[in-house]
Image: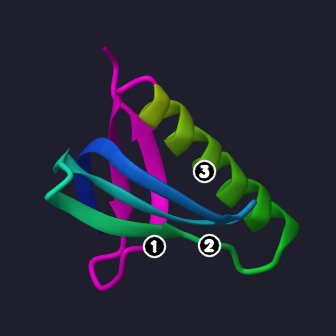
Amino acid sequence: MAVTVGLVQQLSIISPTGACVWVGPRVNNAEVLYVTNDGSVADAAFAANLIQTFAAAAANYRAVSVTHNDDDGKVTMLQVEPV
């Protein structure tokens, strides 16, 4: 598993349970990650919660730690860093 740390530079919400998010120290130095679900109710709720948390972190200029697979950018865990 890989961890990307930084500010939410951009959030593109595609659907209530799908989004692309750019995380990094600056806009021109950010990693593109994505949120999606497998169609189950539990995974859809998890994806929706991730998107809401990314949006709150972006609106409040809070850094995040995003865990994702080494071979792709699918978000598996999100932590908003303390102030």
Contact, mark 1 vs mark 2 (Cβ under 8 Å): yes
x, y percent for residue 58: 43, 36
Side (left or right) of 34 relative to 50: left
Give the quadrant of the C terminus. top left
Mark 2 surroundings: few (<14), some (14-19) or many (≥20) residues within 10 A? many
Range of residues picked out in magenta: 60-83
12 lies above or below 25: below
Residue under numbered circle 3: 51
Ranked by sequence position, the earlier of labels 2 and 3 is 2
Residue at x 24%, y 55% (from the top left corner): 4
x, y percent for residue 33: 39, 68
Hey, which quadrant is residue 13 in on the image? Answer: bottom right
The kind of residue on which mark 3 rests is Ile
Mark 1 and mark 2: span between their CA atoms?
7 Å
Residue under numbered circle 2: 36
Residue under numbered circle 1: 74
